[in-house]
Structures are given as structure tokens and as C-alpha cells.
Image (spheres, rainbow, N blue to C red):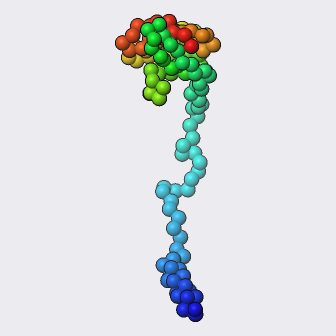
Amino acid sequence: MTRTPLLLALGVAAALAGCSKENHTIVASGPDTGEANVSNTPVTMPPSVTSSKIYRCADNKVVYVDWLSDGKSANVRTEPGGSAVQVVAAEAGKPMTGPGGFSVEGAAGASSARIGVPGHPAQGCKA
């Protein structure tokens, strides 16, 4: 029974023997003045999602639209977990278009929209 505390003390002493008291502070190029990453450009947050709707179109296709708060853009998906394509309009209230033939015409508060996806012309869709 007296060997256990002695062996434990020797183990702790060996572990502490590897420690040194020298300073390990790493300084890249000098003291941080806080001005290296400062920019005078105002930061604009991206628009948030105001409404998410699932639309069934005239050809029985289902389209998922996330309407964004700027009133000029939306994210469109053709599958529930698919990647979104952003459609954008020059002004709020105008038809939104995106790459590959995606288009959306309507408003977040409306119960229907005119939606176009690749391979299908724009058509009436109901939420």
C-alpha cells in the first residue's frame, strides 16, 4: 500500500519535469493596434427570408420559394432539400430573373405567382 502513493508521486514529478518556465507568446509582426482590419466601408446585411411558400404549378410541378425582405429577390428550389437559385429584379415589384431560366413574378403576400424553371415556361402557380 505504501508503493502506490510513492509511484504516483514519481509519475507526477516526471510529468512536471517536462515543463519549462520560458515564455511561449507568439507575436506575428508587432503589437496589435486594432487598426489593421478596420474599414470605413459600411457593412450591409443580406436580406432575410420573410416568407417561405410551396407552390403547385399548372403542370403539377412543385416549386419552393423563399421570399426575401428586400422585395427584389427570392430563392427558388425545385426540390425540398435542393440547392437554391436566387432570382433578382432591378426594382421591387418587377419580375425577378435568375440563371438557367429561373423566373418569379409575384409578391410574398399573394397566394399565387408566375414561376419559370429550366425546361418549363413561366406558368401560374398556387401556394
Query: In the image shown, does 37 or 63 lie closer to the viewer?
Result: 63
Task: From the top left corner, tell me how far across and down residue 93 is, in percent.
Answer: 57, 9
Residue 70 vs 34, above or below: the answer is above
- Please report the residue visible at 58 percent of the width from the left and 88 percent of the height from the top: 5
| Image quadrant in which you'd find residue 78 | top left
Q: Residue furthest front?
A: 60
- Please report the residue visible at 58 percent of the width from the left and 92 percent of the height from the top: 1
Task: From the top left corner, tell me how far across and down residue 50 is, in percent.
Answer: 62, 22
Visible residue check, residue 41: yes
Visible residue check, residue 84: no
- Please report the residue visible at 56 percent of the width from the left and 27 percent of the height from the top: 46
Residue 22 vs 120, above or below: the answer is below
Task: From the top left corner, tell me how far across and down residue 74 is, in percent.
Answer: 53, 19
Query: In the image shown, does 69 or 61 lie closer to the viewer?
Result: 61
Q: Indicate the quadrant containing the C terminus: top left, top right, bottom left or bottom right.
A: top right
Q: Residue furthest left?
A: 119
- Please report the residue visible at 50 percent of the width from the left and 6 percent of the height from the top: 124
Residue 86 vs 12, above or below: the answer is above
